[in-house]
Amino acid sequence: MSKEYTCLGMMSGTSGDGVDASIIQSDGLDKFTILKEKYYQYDENLFREYHDLKKKINSSNDLKKNSPLIKKLENSITIFHAKVVKDITNKFDIDLIGFHGQTIYHNPQEKISLQLGNGNLLSQLTRKKVVYDFRQNDINNGGEGAPLTPIFHKYLIKSKKIELPACMLNIGGISNLTLIHNLNNHEIKSEDVGPGNCLINAWMQNHTNEKFDFNGRISNMGKINEIILEQALETHENNFQKRKNISLDTNDFDISFARGLSLEDGAATLTAFTAKIITSKISLLLREYNNKKIKVLICGGGRKNKSLLKLIEANSNKNLFFFNSDDFGLNGDFIESQAFAYLAIRSILTLPISFPSTTGCNSPCSGGKIIEI
Ligand SMILES: Nc1ncnc2c1ncn2[C@@H]1O[C@H](COP(=O)(O)OP(=O)(O)O)[C@@H](O)[C@H]1O
Ligand SMILES: [Mg+2]
């Protein structure tokens, strides 16, 4: 019988608004139980500090220039996570922690993916075994370090016995797609497919006191400016034509083309831009499957943006059937934090977490630095 571990996974995604935490019990394979889940929002200072710094960092040179600020922020983020551990483990005895950290810079061309999160410090503060820095080993093995969740998406699709081929579409700050067409091998197709909430969030944060467009209400009130949208899509296509990367960073995109539009029209146009990029990338990735019915389970906070979902559905090929992951009993808010708990367990078992078909690495590789206690 395989051994099961109780693990806390903590994920702070590219939206940079807080930490999703999931305590799971799993063997890193097919046994998997959720024990507790909770979201911890960053306080206003931490939110500002992170987003202000993230905007300043657009190259590896910027990383060097800002290194004192980065260290300071990493400390604050680690201490925030330690408080999360303390709160959520109050009634649970965990074996280890999967600590993703907050991405401050991801550039696959430069082979850099940096998450703020000091595993040593977290381990000292919590007196727990910690797995962190999940992406570097994949990068050292020729991969892009992202996306890492596909192996967990595969487990979910398998456990829910969803007819294959099937997809998971995670709409976080960035959107990524996983396609599972065979459960018996690791030929999982996965790729970042475009922005997720990042542009809509940035627009809302620049123009209102809100952090996001709740349920897509603001964009729903606006009118898409088709001329600006077409121009922006053309520019995007030209910029991305030569890029062969499978992963993206939020600073690959920006909202400047919407300036001058009203709050509502800007939100509508940015939402349409986001949906168009996602759907054209998905249709490219799934082009071999045009004659098959494919269920696409949507997870991540973006699944609650009704305007975005409506446009994704309207722009997509008719063989795709979209579902909220919650319809299959999968709480779409916590799939990523569950994934990093699952990946932490796989890391200590030296099971692979990334594959040539997911990140472009040379061979399946495990990952995550391990801090023993
Ligand atoms: N009710 C909602 N309506 C619209 N968007 C939402 C809603 N709830 C969450 N979101 C969006 O989802 C984001 C958080 O989703 P999440 O999957 O945690 O992303 P990330 O992985 O980038 O942290 C928020 O920043 C927001 O843009
Ligand atoms: Mg999040």
Image (tube, helix red, strand yellow):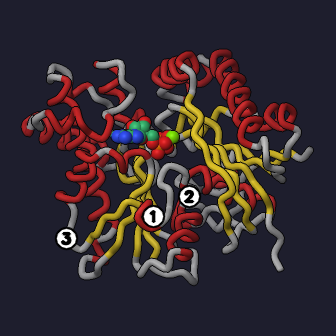
Label pair 3/2, CB-CB below 8 angstroms: no
Q: In which quadrant of the rendered view does residue 224 lie?
A: top left
Q: Which part of the image, by quadrant, shows the C terminus?
A: top right
Left or right, 104 with respect to 273, comes to: right
Q: Residue at x 49, y 18 (%)?
A: 52
Q: Which part of the image, by quadrant, shows the N terminus?
A: bottom right
From this view, report whether residue 101 is shown above or below residue 328. above
Q: Is residue 29 visible?
A: yes
Q: Residue at x 18, y 36 (%)?
A: 268
Is disc 2's CB within 8 Å of ligand 1? Answer: no
Q: In which quadrant of the rendered view does residue 292 lie?
A: bottom left
Task: Looking at the image, tell me whether mark 3 or mark 2 is earlier in sequence order.
Answer: 2
Q: Indicate the amino acid at tag 2.
A: Thr
Is disc 3's CB within 8 Å of ligand 1? Answer: no
Dot 3 falls on a residue whose secondary structure is loop
Dot 2 falls on a residue whose secondary structure is loop
Distance of label 3 from label 1 (alpha carbons): 19 Å
Left or right, 361 with respect to 342, comes to: left
Q: Is residue 140 visible?
A: no
Name the residue beneath numbered marker 1: 178
Residue 51 lies, in percent from the top left, at: 49, 23
Residue 370 lies, in percent from the top left, at: 81, 49
Give 183 or 20, whichever is nearer the viewer. 20
Residue 110 lies, in percent from the top left, at: 54, 40
Task: Report the number of numbered marks.
Answer: 3
Q: Residues within 10 Å of mark 3 (few under 14, many from 20)?
A: few
Q: Indicate the amino acid at tag 3.
A: Lys
- Taking the image in four quarters, ligand 1 sits in the one at top left
Left or right, 168 with respect to 237, comes to: right
Name the residue beneath numbered marker 2: 149
Name the disc covering residue 318, or none: 3
Q: Residue at x 57, y 83 (%)?
A: 184
